[in-house]
Image (tube, helix red, strand yellow):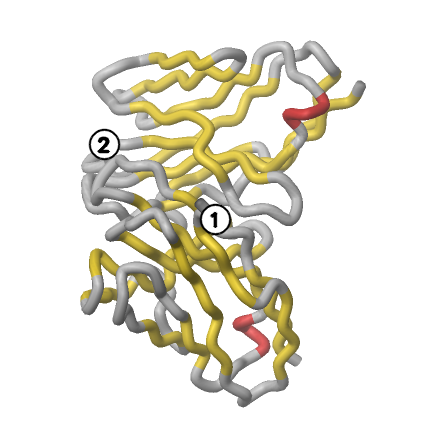
Amino acid sequence: NAGVTQTPKFQVLKTGQSMTLQCAQDMNHEYMSWYRQDPGMGLRLIHYSVGAGITDQGEVPNGYNVSRSTTEDFPLRLLSAAPSQTSVYFCASSYGQSQETQYFGPGTRLLVL
Amino acid sequence: QQQVKQSPQSLIVQKGGISIINCAYENTAFDYFPWYQQFPGKGPALLIAIRPDVSEKKEGRFTISFNKSAKQFSLHIMDSQPGDSATYFCAASFNDYKLSFGAGTTVTVRA
């Protein structure tokens, strides 16, 4: 199993540009989520999904969109990038709802100029 | 506003020493408290977790101590090794999958 994969590893954007961060998992996990990691802030939940076709907002959803058309994929879209979105983004998945291990991908480092 | 407060921000320990990281929370509905370990350039990985019905859980050199009345929990790394050098995050959730993370502690183990 590849686990949780994320692409790209690193991206530079200009303010106002849009892009999609890709996330895929091959563990047949129902639950997937996106976090951003900033120095001194830990990881903050952006959006999450409890199954195909179902998504919900996390702690910091503004400026991001998600969709979940398949169990395997959970892309994160930046509609109009802003410097405040410079961060490291992690995708995670887990088998069940509560108190299950979340498996994190390797991350995407995003720089918005 | 972070729901889980973690300290210290960083610590340095000699090889063989004990590393202690503390976390505090306010939401008494939290019922699951995991610790994640993250190496540079990697995603976090679950290290150890505890539920509030026990006061301590040990896995190898890693121990979680939990104080429900004080709403605090801590990670102890015994006999710290250079390979333990990483960033450690405490987290909490209440039966709904969403984790609230602490700010993280960078541990450096000097040989």
Q: How crowded is mark 1: few (under 14 residues within 10 Å), some or many (20 or more)?
A: few
* Residue drawn 63% across the image and 85% down it: A14
State which chain disc 1 sits on: A
User: What residue is disc 2 on?
Assistant: B31
Q: Residues within 10 Å of mark 2 (few under 14, many from 20)?
A: some
Instruction: Locate residue B99, reporting x and y percent.
Output: 33, 45
Where disc 2 sits, the SS reads: loop
- Amino acid marked by disc 1: Ala
Disc 1 versus disc 2: nearer the observer: 1
Q: In this view, does B49 lie above or below A99?
A: above
Instruction: Locate residue B29, reporting x and y percent.
Output: 19, 37
Farthest-out residue, right: B111
Count of all numbered marks drawn on residues in the image? 2
State which chain disc 2 sits on: B
* Residue drawn 26% across the image and 14% down it: B54
- Amino acid marked by disc 2: Asp
For residue A79, which quarter of the picture? Answer: bottom left
Where disc 1 sits, the SS reads: loop
Q: Is residue B33 above or below residue A63?
A: above
The residues bearing labels 1 and 2 have C-alpha atoms spaced at a distance of 31 Å
Residue under disc 1 on the same chain as residue under disc 2 = no
Q: Kindly check if marks 1 and 2 are in contact, taking CB atoms under 8 A apart as contact.
A: no
User: What residue is disc 1 on?
Assistant: A2
Quadrant holding the N terminus of chain A: top left
